[in-house]
Amino acid sequence: MPVFAIVLFHSTNANCSFTLLCDIRARQWGFALQMLYNSILVTDEDELGSCCKFFGRRPREDVEGDAQNQPDILARQWGFALQMLYNSILVTDEDELGSKLKLDVCLRTLGDPDWFLHQVVSNDGKGIRNMMHWLKKLVSDQPMLFCLEHTGVYAMPMCCYLSDAKLDYCLVAGGLIQKSLGLKRGKSDKVDAKDISRFARMYHKELTLTQLPEKNLLRLKMLLSHRDRLLKAKKMFEVAAGEMKPFLEKSIAGDVVKDSSSVLNHLMKKVEKMDHLISKLIAADQELSKTNQLLQSIPGVGEQLAAHMIVYTRCFTSFKTWRQFACYAGVAPFEYTSGSSIHGRSKVSHLANKKMKSLLHMGAIVSVKCDAEIRNFYIRKKAEGKNSMLVLNAIRNKLLSRMFAVVQRGTPFVQLAKHAA
């Protein structure tokens, strides 16, 4: 699926103010794959379509045997797999060959809402420099604001360039942009660029400037993400091997189960290596090490929860209060009422960081077991007839308040229940 990032430029001068928006999109260029063993030429028949069709060679009368069974090859928008039968090479691509390689740029003014300019450049250092050269010809030395849709690693070239050049920019969630512009019909790279530039023009006074995290925080985030991928792969092999073993004969599934066991051992070693690198990285940074020690002084907060809290809060600098982070993590309850007819229960929102929410849930379960104060709270609320998940969600919020408190105070957590008379 094509992924795009947005970059927006905006001047604070009312007489000469511009917004420039870049939309990184996947543009499909025609390509050909020559299969050497059977002389099949695969070509893209729909360069800019939402899906591509690739056709293999049809059976020929002068070819006998398995060569006549060459299948037609269909590449879908969400990914495809081409099996080259003669050389056993599997080719896969989830982003349609050539995605994330260009920037769609839209230049817009604060004065005239209908005026804009559109430009396309490559999403690399050369393309960004060409874009800046083009921009300087238009706006000269006027102050500018850059606004990017948050797409993770695909926006990093632009973010690094802007940070090095000390230019103001902000990252905006794609969902916020989409919901703020009302109903929308149709979709194209140019239209997306215009829409996001319009969003930036409307809300430029409310946008918050973004700064790249320190390199240690970025590296820690990459290590944690890689660890999560390893665990997902481990789970996949565990489930597959576990389902085969009790229901299939050893002569049928024995080789697969044996190979899965070997892969699982390898993955576990990789996970242990990631844990070692994460611990080493945190210990080498004085600020990260101190924050980690403060967080783990709280019952129920372990290595993974502490490390993820450090990453997602940027070492507790990007959220002012624990309530803001509770909303971000999806553990803050919201009212659901309207007039006199709708009186629904307060509930958490599904718009949340699900990874952080799951870690907080595990921390809440552990704290019930090892913290006397939390355990008494859980038992008391259950005796009052409260739902278990409601009580656990309250404990998740209590953990967040404790974590923010110890970091802001700069002292470890103290269990008062141990010192009570």
Image (tube, grey):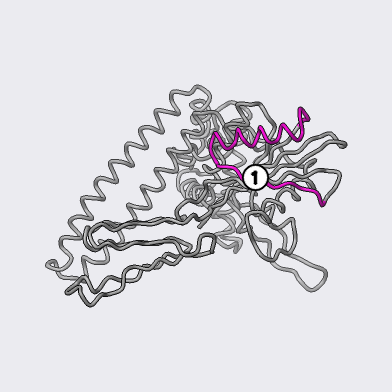
Residue 421 visible within the image: no
Tell me where residue 238 appears, x and y as whole percent.
29, 57
Say left or right for 262 vs 294: left
Residue drawn at point x = 50 percent, y = 44 percent: 372
Q: Secondary structure at mark 1?
A: strand
View extreme (front): residue:
62
Task: Determine if the magenta segment contains residue 139.
Answer: yes
Residue 379 visible within the image: yes
Q: In the image, which residues are magenta?
A: 114-143
Tell me where residue 15 appears, x and y as whole percent.
87, 36
Tell me where residue 265 appears, x and y as whole percent.
24, 47
| In the foreground, 62 or 338 | 62
Residue drawn at point x = 62 percent, y = 41 percent: 401
Residue drawn at point x = 19 percent, y = 55 percent: 259
**Label 1, on which residue?**
22
Q: Is residue 152 above or below residue 288?
A: below
Q: Is residue 137 above or below residue 7?
A: above
Say left or right for 282 vs 384: left
View extreme (left): residue:
251
| In the foreground, 315 or 193 | 193
Residue drawn at point x = 49 percent, y = 40 percent: 301
Task: Determine if the magenta segment contains residue 148.
Answer: no
Tell me where residue 219 appears, x and y as whole percent.
46, 33
Q: Residues within 10 Å of mark 1 (few under 14, many from 20)?
A: many
Q: In terms of image quadrants, where is residue 400?
A: top right
Three-letter code for the amino acid on which mark 1 is drawn:
Cys
